[in-house]
Amino acid sequence: MYELIQLAENSFYMDCPAKVGFFRISPEEVVIIDSGSDKDAGKKVKKILDAQGWKLQAIFNTHSHADHIGGNQYLQTQTGCRIYAPGLECSFTNDPILEPTALYGGYACGDLHNKFLMAKESKAEPLTEDVLPQGLEIIRLPGHSYDMVGFRTSDDVVFLADCLSSAETLEKYKISYLYDVKSYLETLAMVKALKAKAFVPAHAPQTEDIAPLAQLNIEKTEEVISGILNMLTVPKSFEDLLTEVFDTYGMTMNLTQNVLIGSTLKSYLSYLKDAGYVDFFFENNRMLWSRKRSEIPEVTL
Protein backbone atom coordinates (compact mmCIF):
# COMPACT_ATOMS: atom_id res chain seq x y z
CA MET A 1 0.00 0.00 0.00
CA TYR A 2 0.99 3.63 -0.63
CA GLU A 3 2.93 2.67 -3.75
CA LEU A 4 2.55 4.69 -6.96
CA ILE A 5 0.65 2.84 -9.69
CA GLN A 6 0.81 4.02 -13.29
CA LEU A 7 -2.32 3.61 -15.42
CA ALA A 8 -1.33 5.59 -18.52
CA GLU A 9 1.43 7.88 -19.73
CA ASN A 10 0.57 10.74 -17.38
CA SER A 11 -2.04 9.24 -15.02
CA PHE A 12 -1.15 7.53 -11.74
CA TYR A 13 -2.60 6.91 -8.30
CA MET A 14 -1.25 6.21 -4.84
CA ASP A 15 -2.85 3.04 -3.54
CA CYS A 16 -4.21 3.84 -0.08
CA PRO A 17 -7.56 3.72 1.78
CA ALA A 18 -8.74 6.87 -0.06
CA LYS A 19 -6.79 6.77 -3.31
CA VAL A 20 -4.81 9.85 -4.35
CA GLY A 21 -4.64 10.57 -8.08
CA PHE A 22 -1.56 11.99 -9.82
CA PHE A 23 -1.71 13.70 -13.21
CA ARG A 24 1.57 14.77 -14.81
CA ILE A 25 1.13 18.11 -16.60
CA SER A 26 4.78 18.40 -17.68
CA PRO A 27 7.90 16.27 -17.23
CA GLU A 28 8.58 18.03 -13.91
CA GLU A 29 5.12 19.05 -12.63
CA VAL A 30 2.04 17.22 -11.38
CA VAL A 31 -1.32 17.95 -9.84
CA ILE A 32 -2.96 15.53 -7.45
CA ILE A 33 -6.57 14.56 -6.95
CA ASP A 34 -7.26 14.56 -3.19
CA SER A 35 -4.54 14.26 -0.58
CA GLY A 36 -5.35 11.31 1.67
CA SER A 37 -6.71 11.07 5.18
CA ASP A 38 -4.15 12.91 7.30
CA LYS A 39 -0.65 14.33 7.65
CA ASP A 40 0.89 10.86 7.37
CA ALA A 41 -0.81 10.34 4.00
CA GLY A 42 0.47 13.76 2.94
CA LYS A 43 3.99 12.69 3.88
CA LYS A 44 3.67 9.59 1.70
CA VAL A 45 2.53 11.78 -1.21
CA LYS A 46 5.54 14.04 -0.63
CA LYS A 47 7.84 11.01 -0.61
CA ILE A 48 6.50 9.99 -4.04
CA LEU A 49 6.91 13.53 -5.36
CA ASP A 50 10.52 13.63 -4.20
CA ALA A 51 11.31 10.18 -5.55
CA GLN A 52 9.92 11.07 -8.98
CA GLY A 53 11.46 14.54 -9.04
CA TRP A 54 8.02 16.13 -9.45
CA LYS A 55 6.91 19.57 -8.30
CA LEU A 56 3.37 19.71 -6.94
CA GLN A 57 1.51 22.52 -8.66
CA ALA A 58 -1.98 22.04 -7.18
CA ILE A 59 -4.34 19.78 -5.27
CA PHE A 60 -7.79 19.26 -6.76
CA ASN A 61 -10.13 18.05 -4.03
CA THR A 62 -13.13 16.01 -5.14
CA HIS A 63 -15.03 16.88 -1.97
CA SER A 64 -14.41 18.00 1.59
CA HIS A 65 -14.62 14.80 3.64
CA ALA A 66 -11.67 14.45 5.97
CA ASP A 67 -10.24 11.31 4.36
CA HIS A 68 -9.86 13.23 1.09
CA ILE A 69 -8.47 16.55 2.34
CA GLY A 70 -6.50 15.35 5.36
CA GLY A 71 -3.13 15.78 3.66
CA ASN A 72 -3.92 19.26 2.31
CA GLN A 73 -2.40 21.32 5.09
CA TYR A 74 0.87 19.39 5.21
CA LEU A 75 1.37 19.42 1.43
CA GLN A 76 0.45 23.08 1.07
CA THR A 77 2.88 24.00 3.85
CA GLN A 78 5.67 21.88 2.36
CA THR A 79 5.24 22.79 -1.31
CA GLY A 80 3.28 26.04 -1.49
CA CYS A 81 0.82 24.39 -3.87
CA ARG A 82 -2.63 25.82 -4.51
CA ILE A 83 -5.75 23.92 -3.53
CA TYR A 84 -9.05 23.92 -5.37
CA ALA A 85 -12.40 22.50 -4.24
CA PRO A 86 -15.85 22.58 -5.87
CA GLY A 87 -18.84 24.63 -4.69
CA LEU A 88 -19.76 24.23 -1.03
CA GLU A 89 -16.87 21.77 -0.64
CA CYS A 90 -14.52 24.77 -0.83
CA SER A 91 -16.08 26.38 2.25
CA PHE A 92 -15.89 23.11 4.19
CA THR A 93 -12.24 22.65 3.16
CA ASN A 94 -11.35 26.12 4.41
CA ASP A 95 -13.35 25.69 7.64
CA PRO A 96 -13.45 21.97 8.50
CA ILE A 97 -15.49 22.61 11.67
CA LEU A 98 -18.45 22.87 9.28
CA GLU A 99 -18.38 19.10 8.68
CA PRO A 100 -19.14 17.86 12.22
CA THR A 101 -21.46 20.84 12.69
CA ALA A 102 -23.51 19.92 9.61
CA LEU A 103 -23.63 16.23 10.55
CA TYR A 104 -24.66 16.91 14.13
CA GLY A 105 -27.09 19.69 13.26
CA GLY A 106 -25.79 22.11 15.87
CA TYR A 107 -22.64 22.90 17.78
CA ALA A 108 -20.65 19.67 17.68
CA CYS A 109 -19.17 18.58 21.00
CA GLY A 110 -15.43 18.01 21.22
CA ASP A 111 -15.79 14.25 20.75
CA LEU A 112 -16.85 14.93 17.16
CA HIS A 113 -13.75 17.03 16.47
CA ASN A 114 -11.89 13.91 15.40
CA LYS A 115 -9.75 13.23 12.34
CA PHE A 116 -12.45 11.05 10.78
CA LEU A 117 -14.86 13.97 10.58
CA MET A 118 -12.65 17.06 10.72
CA ALA A 119 -9.43 17.59 8.79
CA LYS A 120 -6.88 20.31 9.44
CA GLU A 121 -7.84 23.52 7.67
CA SER A 122 -6.18 24.48 4.41
CA LYS A 123 -6.45 27.45 2.10
CA ALA A 124 -8.68 26.39 -0.78
CA GLU A 125 -9.95 28.32 -3.78
CA PRO A 126 -13.09 27.64 -5.85
CA LEU A 127 -12.70 24.92 -8.46
CA THR A 128 -13.76 26.24 -11.85
CA GLU A 129 -13.05 25.15 -15.40
CA ASP A 130 -10.55 27.97 -15.94
CA VAL A 131 -8.17 26.77 -13.20
CA LEU A 132 -7.84 23.27 -14.64
CA PRO A 133 -4.56 22.33 -16.31
CA GLN A 134 -4.75 21.21 -19.90
CA GLY A 135 -5.83 17.59 -20.08
CA LEU A 136 -8.00 17.50 -16.95
CA GLU A 137 -11.81 17.55 -17.15
CA ILE A 138 -14.36 17.87 -14.33
CA ILE A 139 -17.13 15.26 -13.95
CA ARG A 140 -20.00 16.32 -11.65
CA LEU A 141 -20.83 13.61 -9.09
CA PRO A 142 -23.36 15.02 -6.60
CA GLY A 143 -25.14 12.87 -4.04
CA HIS A 144 -22.55 11.47 -1.66
CA SER A 145 -21.54 15.00 -0.73
CA TYR A 146 -22.78 18.48 -1.59
CA ASP A 147 -20.90 19.28 -4.80
CA MET A 148 -18.58 16.31 -5.25
CA VAL A 149 -16.73 15.95 -8.54
CA GLY A 150 -14.50 13.47 -10.29
CA PHE A 151 -11.98 13.99 -13.05
CA ARG A 152 -11.16 12.55 -16.46
CA THR A 153 -7.58 12.89 -17.69
CA SER A 154 -6.43 13.21 -21.29
CA ASP A 155 -5.17 9.62 -20.87
CA ASP A 156 -8.86 8.60 -20.53
CA VAL A 157 -8.50 7.69 -16.86
CA VAL A 158 -11.49 8.61 -14.69
CA PHE A 159 -11.16 9.32 -10.95
CA LEU A 160 -14.57 8.75 -9.33
CA ALA A 161 -14.07 9.92 -5.73
CA ASP A 162 -16.72 8.42 -3.38
CA CYS A 163 -19.62 7.88 -5.76
CA LEU A 164 -19.17 4.11 -5.46
CA SER A 165 -18.47 1.72 -2.60
CA SER A 166 -16.74 -1.61 -3.13
CA ALA A 167 -18.74 -4.84 -2.97
CA GLU A 168 -16.89 -5.71 0.24
CA THR A 169 -17.78 -2.39 1.87
CA LEU A 170 -21.44 -2.71 0.87
CA GLU A 171 -21.56 -6.22 2.29
CA LYS A 172 -19.89 -5.19 5.55
CA TYR A 173 -21.65 -1.89 6.28
CA LYS A 174 -24.91 -2.26 4.29
CA ILE A 175 -25.71 1.47 4.44
CA SER A 176 -23.27 4.15 3.28
CA TYR A 177 -23.21 7.86 4.04
CA LEU A 178 -25.27 9.94 1.59
CA TYR A 179 -26.31 13.57 1.46
CA ASP A 180 -28.82 13.58 -1.44
CA VAL A 181 -30.34 10.22 -2.38
CA LYS A 182 -32.01 11.38 -5.61
CA SER A 183 -28.83 13.03 -6.93
CA TYR A 184 -26.81 9.99 -5.85
CA LEU A 185 -28.99 7.61 -7.87
CA GLU A 186 -28.81 9.93 -10.87
CA THR A 187 -25.01 10.05 -10.53
CA LEU A 188 -24.80 6.25 -10.39
CA ALA A 189 -26.91 5.93 -13.52
CA MET A 190 -24.62 8.38 -15.33
CA VAL A 191 -21.46 6.63 -14.10
CA LYS A 192 -22.83 3.24 -15.12
CA ALA A 193 -22.90 4.45 -18.74
CA LEU A 194 -19.39 5.91 -18.74
CA LYS A 195 -16.60 4.42 -20.83
CA ALA A 196 -12.89 4.94 -20.12
CA LYS A 197 -9.52 3.25 -20.28
CA ALA A 198 -9.55 2.91 -16.50
CA PHE A 199 -11.74 3.94 -13.57
CA VAL A 200 -10.33 4.74 -10.13
CA PRO A 201 -12.95 4.85 -7.36
CA ALA A 202 -11.49 6.15 -4.10
CA HIS A 203 -12.63 3.17 -2.05
CA ALA A 204 -12.86 0.33 -4.56
CA PRO A 205 -10.39 -1.43 -6.86
CA GLN A 206 -9.35 0.20 -10.12
CA THR A 207 -11.27 -1.30 -13.04
CA GLU A 208 -11.78 -1.02 -16.80
CA ASP A 209 -15.55 -1.62 -16.51
CA ILE A 210 -17.39 0.37 -13.86
CA ALA A 211 -20.93 -0.66 -14.86
CA PRO A 212 -21.27 -3.79 -12.65
CA LEU A 213 -20.17 -1.94 -9.51
CA ALA A 214 -22.40 1.03 -10.32
CA GLN A 215 -25.36 -1.33 -10.71
CA LEU A 216 -24.55 -3.02 -7.39
CA ASN A 217 -24.50 0.37 -5.66
CA ILE A 218 -27.87 1.23 -7.24
CA GLU A 219 -29.35 -2.06 -6.02
CA LYS A 220 -28.01 -1.61 -2.49
CA THR A 221 -29.44 1.92 -2.34
CA GLU A 222 -32.81 0.60 -3.51
CA GLU A 223 -32.64 -2.10 -0.80
CA VAL A 224 -32.17 0.56 1.86
CA ILE A 225 -35.12 2.54 0.47
CA SER A 226 -37.32 -0.57 0.62
CA GLY A 227 -36.04 -1.44 4.08
CA ILE A 228 -36.90 1.96 5.53
CA LEU A 229 -40.38 1.82 4.01
CA ASN A 230 -40.96 -1.62 5.53
CA MET A 231 -39.89 -0.26 8.93
CA LEU A 232 -42.47 2.51 8.66
CA THR A 233 -45.60 0.38 8.29
CA VAL A 234 -46.02 1.41 11.93
CA PRO A 235 -45.35 5.11 12.73
CA LYS A 236 -42.01 5.70 14.43
CA SER A 237 -40.01 8.58 15.82
CA PHE A 238 -36.70 9.31 14.15
CA GLU A 239 -34.75 7.93 17.13
CA ASP A 240 -36.73 4.68 17.15
CA LEU A 241 -36.26 4.35 13.39
CA LEU A 242 -32.52 5.00 13.70
CA THR A 243 -32.22 2.26 16.33
CA GLU A 244 -34.09 -0.15 14.07
CA VAL A 245 -31.77 0.71 11.16
CA PHE A 246 -28.72 -0.08 13.31
CA ASP A 247 -30.28 -3.32 14.53
CA THR A 248 -31.45 -4.40 11.07
CA TYR A 249 -28.09 -3.81 9.43
CA GLY A 250 -26.06 -5.27 12.28
CA MET A 251 -24.26 -2.06 13.17
CA THR A 252 -23.05 -0.91 16.59
CA MET A 253 -23.84 2.68 17.47
CA ASN A 254 -21.22 5.12 18.67
CA LEU A 255 -21.17 8.90 18.43
CA THR A 256 -19.48 9.10 15.02
CA GLN A 257 -21.76 6.42 13.54
CA ASN A 258 -24.78 8.08 15.14
CA VAL A 259 -24.19 11.34 13.28
CA LEU A 260 -23.11 9.71 9.99
CA ILE A 261 -25.94 7.18 9.75
CA GLY A 262 -28.40 9.56 11.40
CA SER A 263 -27.68 12.22 8.78
CA THR A 264 -27.98 9.59 6.04
CA LEU A 265 -31.31 8.37 7.39
CA LYS A 266 -32.63 11.94 7.32
CA SER A 267 -31.56 12.15 3.68
CA TYR A 268 -33.46 8.96 2.86
CA LEU A 269 -36.54 10.27 4.68
CA SER A 270 -36.35 13.54 2.74
CA TYR A 271 -36.11 11.61 -0.52
CA LEU A 272 -39.13 9.47 0.39
CA LYS A 273 -41.12 12.46 1.67
CA ASP A 274 -40.53 14.44 -1.52
CA ALA A 275 -41.50 11.38 -3.58
CA GLY A 276 -44.76 11.04 -1.63
CA TYR A 277 -44.02 7.68 0.01
CA VAL A 278 -43.71 8.78 3.64
CA ASP A 279 -45.05 11.61 5.74
CA PHE A 280 -44.71 12.90 9.26
CA PHE A 281 -47.15 14.03 11.90
CA PHE A 282 -46.97 15.27 15.46
CA GLU A 283 -48.49 13.48 18.43
CA ASN A 284 -47.98 14.37 22.09
CA ASN A 285 -45.11 16.65 21.10
CA ARG A 286 -43.40 13.83 19.22
CA MET A 287 -42.62 13.88 15.50
CA LEU A 288 -43.52 10.53 13.96
CA TRP A 289 -42.75 9.19 10.49
CA SER A 290 -45.08 6.79 8.70
CA ARG A 291 -45.44 5.08 5.35
CA LYS A 292 -47.97 6.91 3.18
CA ARG A 293 -48.27 4.54 0.22
CA SER A 294 -48.42 0.77 0.32
CA GLU A 295 -46.28 -0.02 -2.73
CA ILE A 296 -42.49 0.08 -2.79
CA PRO A 297 -41.33 2.87 -5.14
CA GLU A 298 -39.78 1.95 -8.44
CA VAL A 299 -36.70 4.15 -8.62
CA THR A 300 -36.84 6.30 -11.75
CA LEU A 301 -33.51 7.66 -12.97
Image (cartoon, rainbow, N blue to C red):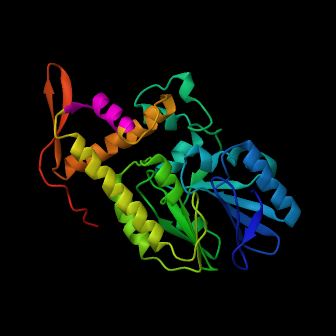
| Magenta stretch: includes residue 158 | no
Magenta highlight on residue 239: yes
Quadrant position of the N terminus in the picture = bottom right
Q: Closest to the observer: 275 or 169? A: 169
Residue 246, horizontal then vertical, whole percent: 39, 36
Q: Nearer the viewer, residue 225 or 14?
A: 225
Q: Measuring 51% from the left and 33% from the top, which residue is drawn there?
A: 256
Whole-percent x and y of residue 104?
A: 43, 31
Q: Is residue 59 left or right of residue 105?
A: right
Q: Magenta residues, as a range?
A: 236-247
Against 97, residue 274 (above or below) is below
Residue farthest to the top?
284
Please name the predominant secondary structure of the magenta segment in the image.
helix
Number of labels in the image equals 0
- Closer to the camera, 117 or 90? 117
Residue 119: image quadrant is top right
Q: Is residue 114 left or right of residue 39?
A: left
Quarter of the image with the C terminus in it: bottom left
How far across and how far down the image is residue 78, in percent? 81, 48
Q: Residue at x 25, y 62 (%)?
A: 299
Where is residue 280? Give x, y as percent: 17, 36
Front residue of this view, candidates 162 and 153: 162
Which residue occupies 56% across, 57% down? Answer: 62
229 is higher (above) or lower (below) than 138: above
State whether residue 266 is above or below residue 254: below
Q: Residue at x 17, y 49 (%)?
A: 277
Does 222 appear above or below 117? below
